[in-house]
Image (tube, rainbow, N blue to C red):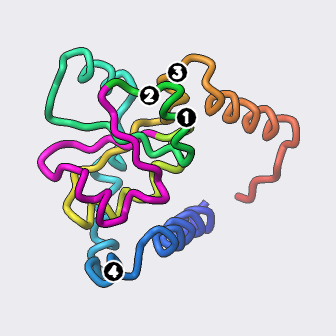
Amino acid sequence: MKKMTNLVVAAFFMSLFVLVSPALAQQVPLAKLNEVLAAAPSQGFWQVKADEVHAWVQQKKTDFVVVDVRPNPAEYAQGHIPGSLQISVQNILSSENLAKLPKNKKVILACVTGQTQNLPVVALRALGYDVYTMSFGYAAWIPGYHGGQNMQNAIQNAGAKKFPLAK
């Protein structure tokens, strides 16, 4: 299990290098990224549930903003969380898009299944944004959404194949 955890952490940091522009890399030292990541377990890995986001939307709260980070902007046009901004995950760390994000509000990232939205969290937190992800992304928001179907297919595949687990 420890080996798997180490692989996940290594993959996460490698994904940061893909997302982080050279200019951003100069602004955020690796020690700061490590500090932010080390705090993740005690802060619930910065996740909120769709029910919480829905309640905030219904209550017309103004202390948060949802950012739809699905890689395909056409999906935003097909339906999105009311009041959300659309910034694709691959573009969220550009200077132009960082300027759109408030530092005085919670920033909730939402993608298809809740995986892609996690990529920029540590970098954004290191830059001073109060960023969270919506657990399971739009799969938790839209009934029958293809993201949920993709997750179900993966679960069924794992059950059928019975992949080995080392202990």
CA–CA distance between discs 2 and 1? 8 Å
Above or below, 129 relative to 32:
above
Above or below, 59 relative to 134:
above
Q: Amino acid at mark 1?
A: Glu
Q: Which residue is mark 3?
A: 142
Task: Give the class, few, some or many, for how many residues have Cα within 10 Å of label 2's Cα (few <14, many ≥20).
Answer: some
Residue 102 part of the magenta-drawn span: yes
- Marks 2,1: beta carbons within 8 A: yes
Q: Is residue 65 left or right of residue 142?
A: left
Element under label 4?
A: helix
Q: Amino acid at mark 2?
A: His
Q: Which residue is mark 1?
A: 75
Q: Nearer the viewer, mark 3 or mark 1?
A: 1
Most foreground residue, 102 or 163: 102
Q: Nearer the viewer, mark 2 or mark 3?
A: 2
Q: Is residue 27 left or right of residue 146?
A: left
CA–CA distance between discs 2 and 4? 31 Å
Q: Amino acid at mark 3?
A: Ile
Quarter the C terminus occupies: bottom right
Element under label 2?
A: loop
Q: Residue at x 55, y 69 (%)?
A: 6
Residue span colored magenta: 83-110
Q: Is residue 164 visible?
A: yes
CA–CA distance between discs 4 and 3? 37 Å
Residue 100 image position (x, y, % from top left) = 25, 51
Q: Residue at x 33, y 47 (%)?
A: 46
Residue 51 part of the magenta-drawn span: no
Element under label 3?
A: loop
Q: Is residue 101 left or right of residue 133?
A: left
Q: Which residue is mark 2?
A: 80
Labelled disc at residue 23: 4
